[in-house]
Amino acid sequence: MNEETYYIPNNFTDAGRVFGLFEIRNFIEALILTLPLLLLCFKFLPFELSVKLVIALSVAVPIGGFALIGIDGDSLTRWIGCWWHWRRARRRICYRGEVKRK
């Protein structure tokens, strides 16, 4: 009996994640959504810096957090792709792989 014991480290699920929490795809989507908003807020708002910062963070943090978390475990683009596919195919009624027509 030659039994070998393999120890699984605590951080084995951290691969492919940012800070061990967020998937890389979700992180990139959050950056793509929030960076333009931050730049627009800082460039075009006619307030002083502290007010610009508060407004920019009030807008960017919820949007970025939503993009980091995703919807039902999926990234936003993957969810939108599935929704778009469902939206286009929702009027087709299939029965055993064939389209029934009246």
Image (cartoon, rainbow, N blue to C red):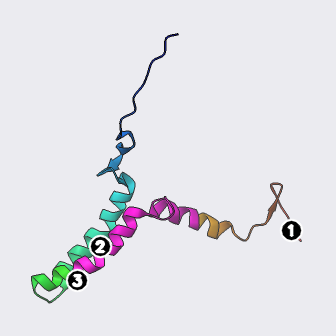
- Relative to 85, is 102 on the left or the right? right
Residue drawn at x 10%, y 86% as measured from the top left: 48
Q: Position of residue 42 (x, y in %)?
A: 17, 79
For label 3, the residue is: 55
Residue placed farthest to the top in the image? 1
Q: Secondary structure at mark 1?
A: loop
Residue shown at the point (29%, 74%) measured from the top left: 60
Q: Which callout, 1 or 2, points at the residue further toward the start of the chain?
A: 2
**Along the horizontal axis of the image, is 96 left or right of 83?**
right
| Magenta span | 56-83
Image x and y of residue 98, in percent: 83, 57
Residue situated furthest front in the rendering: 1
Q: Foreground: 8 or 72?
A: 8
Tell me the residue at 75%/67% (across/down): 92
SS type, badge 2: helix
The 10 Å Cα crowd at callout 3, few under 14, some 14 to 19, many 20 or more, is some
Q: Nearer the viewer, mark 3 or mark 1?
A: 3
Q: Which residue is mark 2?
A: 61
Q: Give the side of residue 66 with respect to residue 60, left or right.
A: right
